[in-house]
Image (cartoon, rainbow, N blue to C red):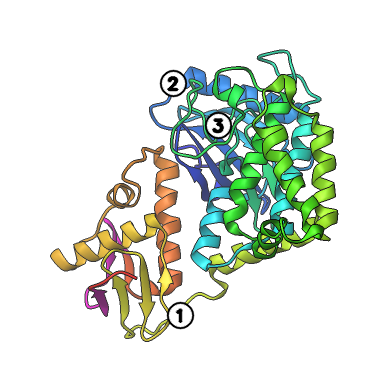
Amino acid sequence: MLWLGRYRNVLPVRSQGAFHIVSVERDGTAARSIVVLGSRGADAERVVAALARIERAHAVVDHPCIARPIERGEEGGVAFLELAADAVVDGSEVLRLLADSGQKLSYNHGDTIFTTLRETLEVAHRATAATTGGPLCLGQLSFGNFLFSRDGRMWIVGLGHNFPIFTETDRLEGLTPVWQAWEVHAGQPPTPSSDYVAVLLGARSLATFCELAEITQRVLQAATSPRNVELYETVRWFETSFIHLPPDRRPSIGEGIAKSQRLREILGMRIDRDGMRARIAQLLAHAEGETESNPSEHETVTVASDGRWLAVGNGARAKLGRANGLLIRALVAEHQERPGHALSVWELLDAGWPDDDPIPEAGANRVYVAIARLRQLGLRHSIERDADGYRIRPGAPIRVASGAV
C-alpha cells in the first residue's frame, strides 16, 4: 500500500473524480504535505503524464500559493505526486462548513480570496505551458481548485492539469460546478483573459456565502440615491463590459483590476489577507472539535431518521454532512436489525459515498475521518470497533427521531 513505510496521519482532502488529494506526514517529521494520485480504474499511463504536467507547472510558477514539488513516483502500482503544502481541506469543504455553521464570510474576505487567486494566476501566465507553448492558464475554475491549511493559508491547484475537475483523459469529471469563459466552453484554448472571466464568475458565485446585505441595498438604491450610482455602474460594468463580451472586444485585465480597486474605494474596504486567513482558521478549528461534545456513557444520543443531525441528551442538534449522515444511518440500521454486528470499512464506504470509487487507501481514510467526527459530535461511547469493522455498541442509548430537522 502506498502509505506503508512512507507516510502517516493520512487524511483525505478531496476524494472524488479521477484524482484524489490526501494530506500526509512523512515518517520522522510533523510537517504535512499533500499527495495527488489517480483513482482506481483510471488509465495509468495518462495519470502518470498528468502528474508530470502538474509537477512541471508547480516547479516553474514562483508564488507562495503554488506548492513546490517534493517527489513524483509510483508505489504499489499507484502513481503519485507529493507537493509541499500543509493543506487539510479544499474550498468545497470550507463552503460546506460555512453552510453547516450558518455563518458567512465578510465581503472583504471573499474579495481577498479571489484577488489572491487572480494574483496567483497572473504569475502563472508569465510561465509557458508545456502542452501549448503559450501562457500557463487554468481554463476552468471550481472551489476544488482552492486548498486551505489549518492556519487558514490558501493554496491554488490545477495548473498543468486541472485534476480537481478533469479526468486523466481531459474530460470534466462532472461532479463539481465549474466556471469558465464562454470561448473555453466552446473548445478554444484558455488565455489570461478567459482565466480572469473565470475568476469573476467564481467570485460572483461566492456571494451566497458572504455578507452582502448593505452592498446589495446600496446597489438597489442607485436610482434614488446619487451617491450610489457609481457603485451600481461599476458592478454593472463587470457583467456588461467584460464577462459577456467576446475576447476581441473585452477590456484589458488591467482595466478590470482598476475597476475592482475603485469598487473597494467606493465601499470603503480593502484587501485583508491576515483577516481572511484567521477567519478560515477559526472555521476549521471549530469544525475539528474545539466545541466537541463529551457525553457520559449513559447519556442518550438522538439521531434523525434521515441522518441530518444528532443530539446528545437535551443538547443542541449538531448538523451532519451528507456522507456522515448516510454513514450513521447505516450503523444505526445495522444495530436495529442485527444488534452487535459490525459493518466493514468497505461497507461503510459504500454507505457513505455510494457514487464514488476511490482507491482503497483514500476510501479507508474517508471512513476513519468520518467515524472520528461522529465520535466528536457525541457518539464517542456509542461507536466501537471490533475485528470486523465498526458497530453501535450493544446496549448503547441510541434513539432514532421520527422526523427530520
Residue 65 vertical position relative to residue 324 in the rendered view, above or below: above
Q: Is residue 399 magenta?
A: yes
- Disc 2: CA contacts within 10 A as few (<14), some (14-19) or many (>=20): some
**Vertical comparison of 200 with 394: above or below:** above
> Residue 118 appears at what percent x and percent y?
75, 39
Q: Which residue is mark 2?
A: 43
| Quarter of the image with the N terminus in it | top left
| Residue 48 among magenta residues | no
Quadrant for the C terminus, please. bottom left
Relative image position of residue 149 (x, y in whole percent)? 66, 53
Q: Earlier in the sequence, mark 1 or mark 3?
A: 3
* Residue assigned mark 1: 294
Q: Which residues, given as a range, are shown in magenta?
A: 385-401
Q: CA distance from mark 1 to mark 2?
A: 46 Å
Classed neighbour count for the residue bearing mark 1: other residues with Cα under 10 Å, few (<14), some (14–19), many (≥20): some
Which of 9/399 is in front?
399
Which one is earlier in the sequence, the residue at label 1 or at label 2? 2
Which residue is rendered at x = 65% and y = 46% of the image? Answer: 203
